[in-house]
Image (spheres, rainbow, N blue to C red):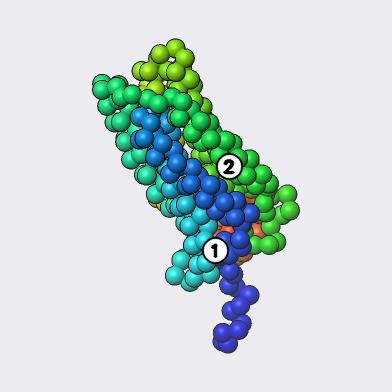
């Protein structure tokens, strides 16, 4: 058999990861902006003695690191999309980047909480006149970042082959995560400004480190959710029950066919691989069962195993 005759049975395993995504350039731009403002806020927080400002700067540092990792994830996935060493493409790079980002966030949250408690127990002088403008600038940067990333929330075609149905679209989950990240950062900036204003005009200096603790809580909540979401993809946790139910329904709707074993897992944002074992008293070719699966399910790689049995079983 000539090698060329096998071409019709093989397919690309890049699953669309080789294409430059719209969110990559936006993420790079926001990373640069956030990194610059982070350095300014941390330096100002130390110089002016503001824990809320320092906490906001550290919180922004976590976002700068997360955005940088996200940008690196985009680049790596695109650069190595067709590398045969990756059995199911590089789609999981987004989840790996998110997991690393979540670990950094958790560490930063602990640092923020530690410093806030220290300032509650041992208050330091705060130069409100200098700290408030810096905090305001930080909020402005966050708003700009939200607008930049928010502009990229268009629907995109599914990352599978080009013949997928036109009505099947998806959000760039990596971009969405970055968007929510800077949005959370903007909220923390508001907390810092409120604490500084109340401290300056009403003498509530204790509110500054308290807002630092609130910011630490926000980071912890975000990090725990990200660890759970990205970790489930990295550990090949079964796809959502709704998707598996649809697969089972279309296969078992075929006469005398039952699914004996079903595994569906994510290989990229909204892209899944499936391994299906079908048992039937009147078995058909694997291609018959594969053709029953709707394209909009996002199954980019499907393996079907067929077993014959007697009708009484």
Q: Compared to 54, does 61 lie above or below?
A: below
- Outermost residue on the right side: it is 166
Q: Position of residue 22 (x, y in %)?
A: 63, 54
How far apart in space, not on screen, are marks 2 and 1 (Cα)? 24 Å
Q: Residue at x 40, y 26 (%)?
A: 127
In the picture of the structure, the residue carrying the numbered disc 2 is 145
**What crowding class fits label 2: few (fewer than 14 Cα within 10 Å), some (14-19), or many (20 or more)?**
many
Name the mark on residue 284: none
Q: Compared to 189, does 160 lie above or below?
A: below
Residue 128 visible here: yes
Pick whichever of labels 2 and 1 is earlier in the sequence. 1
Q: Position of residue 123 (x, y in %)?
A: 29, 22
In the picture of the structure, the residue carrying the numbered disc 1 is 78
On the rendered structure, is 75 left or right of 46?
Answer: right
Location of residue 284 (image quadrant) = bottom right
Dot 1: element: helix
């Amino acid at each position: 058999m000539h090698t060329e005759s096998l071409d019709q049975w093989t397919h690309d395993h890049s699953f669309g990861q080789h294409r430059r995504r719209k969110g990559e350039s936006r993420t790079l731009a926001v990373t640069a902006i956030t990194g610059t403002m982070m350095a300014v806020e941390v330096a100002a927080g130390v110089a002016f003695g503001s824990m809320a400002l320092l906490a906001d700067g550290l919180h922004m540092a976590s976002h700068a690191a997360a955005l940088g990792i996200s940008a690196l994830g985009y680049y790596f996935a695109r650069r190595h999309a067709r590398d045969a060493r990756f059995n199911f493409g590089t789609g999981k790079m987004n989840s790996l980047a998110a997991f690393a980002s979540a670990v950094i966030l958790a560490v930063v949250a602990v640092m923020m909480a530690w410093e806030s408690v220290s300032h509650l127990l041992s208050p330091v002088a705060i130069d409100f006149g200098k700290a408030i403008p810096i905090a305001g600038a930080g909020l402005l940067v966050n708003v700009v970042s939200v607008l930049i990333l928010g502009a990229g929330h268009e629907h995109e075609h599914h990352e599978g082959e080009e013949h997928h149905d036109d009505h099947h679209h998806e959000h760039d989950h990596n971009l969405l995560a970055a968007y929510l990240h800077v949005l959370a950062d903007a909220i923390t900036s508001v907390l810092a400004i409120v604490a500084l204003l109340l401290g300056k005009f009403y003498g509530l200096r204790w509110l500054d480190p308290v807002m630092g603790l609130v910011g630490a809580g926000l980071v912890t909540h975000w990090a725990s959710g990200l660890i759970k979401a990205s970790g489930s993809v990295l550990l090949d946790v079964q796809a959502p029950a709704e998707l598996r139910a649809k697969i089972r329904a279309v296969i078992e709707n075929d006469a005398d066919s039952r699914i004996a074993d079903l595994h569906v897992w994510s290989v990229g944002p909204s892209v899944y691989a499936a391994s299906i074992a079908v048992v039937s008293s009147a078995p058909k070719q694997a291609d018959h069962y594969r053709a029953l699966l709707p394209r909009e399910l996002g199954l980019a790689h499907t393996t079907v195993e067929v077993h014959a049995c007697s009708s009484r079983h």
